Image (tube, rainbow, N blue to C red):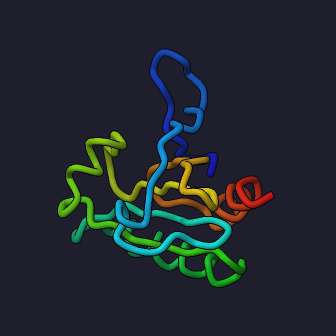
Amino acid sequence: MTAHEETRADEGAAAPPSGDVLTAHDIGAELGERATLVQFSTVFCQPCRATRRILDEVAGMVGGVAHVEVDAEARLDLVRRLDILRTPTVLVLDASGRVTRRASGQPRKADVIAALGETVA
């Protein structure tokens, strides 16, 4: 998910995984057996709709992968904890719920597939 990977101003490079771990309780749904695509969205976000379609399609292509959409406005606690600054923001979680990749903005399907491949490898 290279095009919109979040960066740290002091590093100037793609932000490394945060080390955050999310549980099924945190996101309100079961984690995928192999990985989970977590999408933070808001009601009036146009790119969120396209992102939802892309992530649903990718999750359907790869066994053991779940796509979970989180309403950012309803989960401000999680938004603050994870420092979500805009929607859509997509987190890729490994099987244990650890955040391995993070990007904001509408992702390209190929980038999602690549990030997922790195996570489940």
Most extreme residue toward the right is 121
Determine which quarter of the picture holds residue 50. Answer: bottom left
**Above or below — where is 19 with respect to 13?**
below
Q: Position of residue 104 (x, y in %)?
A: 45, 50
Q: Position of residue 40 (x, y in %)?
A: 36, 60
Please tell me how many numbered marks the rendered image carries: 0
* Residue drawn at (53%, 65%) of the image: 37
* Residue drawn at (63%, 57%) of the image: 94
Taking 104 as reference, is 11 left or right? right
Q: Position of residue 26 (x, y in %)?
A: 35, 60
* Residue drawn at (33%, 39%) of the image: 83
Of residues 41 and 82, the one nearer the viewer is 82
* Residue drawn at (59%, 33%) of the image: 16
**Above or below — where is 87 with respect to 20?**
below
Of residues 62 and 103, the one nearer the viewer is 62
Taking 5 as reference, is 46 left or right? left
Q: Position of residue 93 (x, y in %)?
A: 57, 56
Q: Looking at the rendering, in which quadrant would you find the C terminus?
A: bottom right
